[in-house]
Amino acid sequence: MNANGKDTPHNDEEAMKCLRLTAEQGDVRAQYLMGVMHEDGDKGIPQNDEEAIKWYLLAADQGYARAQCNLGIMHADGKGTPRNYVQAVKWFRLAAEQGHARAQCNLGVMHLNGEGTPQNYKHAGEWLRLAAKQGHARAQCNLGVMHTNGAGTTQNHKEALKWYQLAADQGDADAQYCLGVMYEDGMGIPQNCEQATKWYRLAADQGHARAQGHLGVMNVIGEGTPQNYKQAIEWLRLAADQGYARAQCNLGLMYEDGKGTPKDEEEAIKWYHLAADQGDVDAQYYLSLMFQCGKVKPRSHEEAIQWYRLIADQGDAIPKCNSPAVLDDGKGSQRNRS
């Protein structure tokens, strides 16, 4: 018994029976928790997105904002139901109007990307700002992206820096990466490669592929950190293994030149191919040279020409890799929504 003389569950199974009974009696928080446990597969409950949606919907229909937000995420991601951005926007809006910060952020992202609602930078900024003022890190980062790109507002690197810093200080990996870019390029702040490396490392340690790729390059050229080819290879491989094309290309260069690793043209070609197939212009160029020079067997001028044509079709400008706006699913994942 507890201090109030009431029986308390002795194990997870008994606790779940009590929770289910309470949910079936219409308790909104219990219904929400049942949804969470089915979505996550927690407390001995098998993971089941369809069952999670059932419980979220029961709580959402009673106006429970957290369930409405989670239901919006399920619709946006197509979990347990066909992907439906219009339904996602509906549920995000209902929760956002109650002041739910995560829903406000996600509704802002939907407006930013034009998913389930016409693209509207003004509305995106309004919703993101509401969430950001509540201290929501992902919204703060997304606001920083808007100010960096001048989306719906005048481009303002100092304002972007402010929002990135607020989010980065909370541990948001995208914001830490973006802050690294700002320091590396001197946008809104004096250039400082040591600070750039610091923020890249914080994001990279969380598995952020772009930060890992940038940190690899910093180790190659010795900016913000002593030159260290071996360390560069380690960071580039982590990013490349996640499919980050620029890191795959740079890893190919390391193998072709034998920096930090024995020279291995076959390994270089493998990484160039992976990056080139994703449209990386540098990788396409290096791969075309490999074909033209006969480093790929059999030698093929036709293959080289094919890659040159792809480069020409894209133009020769390679944009800086900026983090796109992302939804917040409440689990710390970084899911591209652009």
Image (cartoon, rainbow, N blue to C red):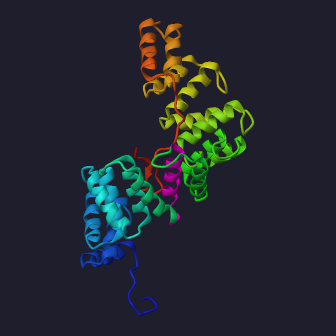
Q: Position of residue 280 (x, y in %)?
A: 48, 26
Rendering quarter of residue 123: bottom left
Residue 141 in the magenta stretch? The answer is yes
Instruction: State the residue in front, 205 or 214.
Output: 214
Q: Position of residue 16 (x, y in %)?
A: 34, 73
Instruction: State the residue in front, 92 or 247.
Output: 92
Quadrant in which the N terminus is drawn: bottom left
Question: Does residue 263 appear in the picture of this structure?
Answer: no
The residue at 35%/63% (across/down) is: 69
The residue at 70%/41% (across/down) is: 191
Instruction: State the residue in front, 217 or 39.
Output: 217
Residue that extends furthest to the bottom in the rendered view of this protein: 5
Quadrant in which the C terminus is drawn: top left
Q: Position of residue 240 (x, y in %)?
A: 52, 34
Residue 237 in the magenta stretch? The answer is no
Rendering quarter of residue 18: bottom left
Residue that extends furthest to the front in the rendered view of this protein: 154
Q: Position of residue 53 (x, y in %)?
A: 27, 61
The residue at 32%/66% (across/down) is: 94
Give above or below for 298 relative to 338.
Answer: above
Residue 273 falls left or right of residue 186? left
Stretch in magenta = 134-149
Question: Does residue 105 appear in the picture of this structure?
Answer: yes
Give above or below for 169 relative to 305.
Answer: below
Q: Main secondary structure of the magenta part?
A: helix
Instruction: State the residue in front, 80 or 144.
Output: 144
Residue that extends furthest to the right in the rendered view of this protein: 226
